[in-house]
Image (spheres, helix red, strand yellow):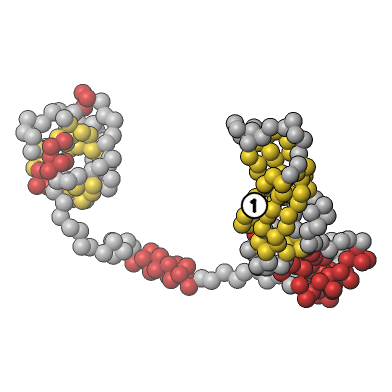
Amino acid sequence: MTRIIRCPSCATVYSVDTAQIQAAHGWLRCGKCQEVFNGTGLDVPVSPVLLAPASDSLAAHAIDPALAQPVNRVALDDFLLREDRSDPVSKLDPDVSADLLAFSEALATFKPQLPTHEPTAPLPDKTGPVPTPLFQYVTAAALALLLLGQIFFFQRHAMAALWPNSRPVLESLCLPLDCQLKPWMNLKALEMEGTSFAQSGQSFVLNWSLRNTGPMTVTTPSFELTLLDEFNNPVVRRIFLPDEVQAPATLLPGQVWKGSLTVRVDPSLVFSHYRLLNFYP
């Protein structure tokens, strides 16, 4: 394949085989002005009638752009790149070179002066006055007191159970709030250690033993007695509040409450066994 290359120095046009360009890695030497240049991208459109194909793949024809006639072939060695160690500045006119060097020096040392701006007065703040630190402290203190009040109101029963000595103080705090201080309710701390439901004459006697296994004083619960048939279906159910069974108001940590109650059962009721549960209404 043949490429049309123009010398960038004297504008001489050559018809060069692609293999020659590849062998020279793109670097060529003009056979007319001896200028060394890279032929990559220097292809020019030339009418095919003005070019004579080379018979030897290692030669090319030079074409004068004025006459557009082929010239003598140039050997491939004339196109190969030889390093040009000449000073490009020395090729220029001495006066021109001196002017260029002086301009380059001046350009390198040039430091433009940036315009200075005088500080402007700050714009007035339209968002309102900034809160003073004292106001922030007062606000934080008020929020803290509000939080403590909420904790006291909702957890007062647990606080009284956890710290029994604080009960008088908590009761005095409840007076202006019109709230009551009740013992702590914790069913998980209550363990039923034993029960019995035995007939005695025309009635039955219910016995129980209830222990507070928790670390805090808890409210005494209510009882639910259920009589069941042989298929575990409830026949009758009865609720006993603490006042009905003469229960203490509270159970201290580790305290055991043993009690009994006489229960009258309708003789027409047929039941097989019973179930006793404790709960808070």
Dividing the picture into quarters, in which one does residue 5 lie? top left
Q: Nearer the viewer, residue 275 or 70?
A: 275
Q: Nearer the viewer, residue 206 or 132?
A: 206
**Position of 175 compared to 184: left or right?**
right
Query: Which residue is at the far front?
Result: 201
Residue 61 visible, this orientation: no
Residue at 21% across / 23% down in the picture? 49
Residue 210 visible, this orientation: yes
Residue 101 coordinates in the image, percent (x, y): 39, 68
Q: In which quadrant is the N terminus drawn?
A: top left
Residue 266 coordinates in the image, percent (x, y): 77, 35
**Position of 179 compared to 184: left or right?**
right
Q: Is residue 153 above or below residue 241?
A: below
Q: Is residue 124 above or below residue 35?
A: below
Q: Disc 1 residue type?
A: Thr
Q: Nearer the viewer, residue 37 or 255?
A: 255
Residue at 16% across / 36% down in the picture? 18
Residue 237 coordinates in the image, percent (x, y): 74, 38
Q: Which residue is mark 1?
A: 195
Residue 245 coordinates in the image, percent (x, y): 79, 54
Q: Is residue 111 above or below residue 46?
A: below
Q: Secondary structure at mark 1?
A: strand
Query: Which residue is at the far left?
Result: 56
Q: Is residue 195 above or below residue 65?
A: below
Dividing the picture into quarters, in which one does residue 138 lie? bottom right
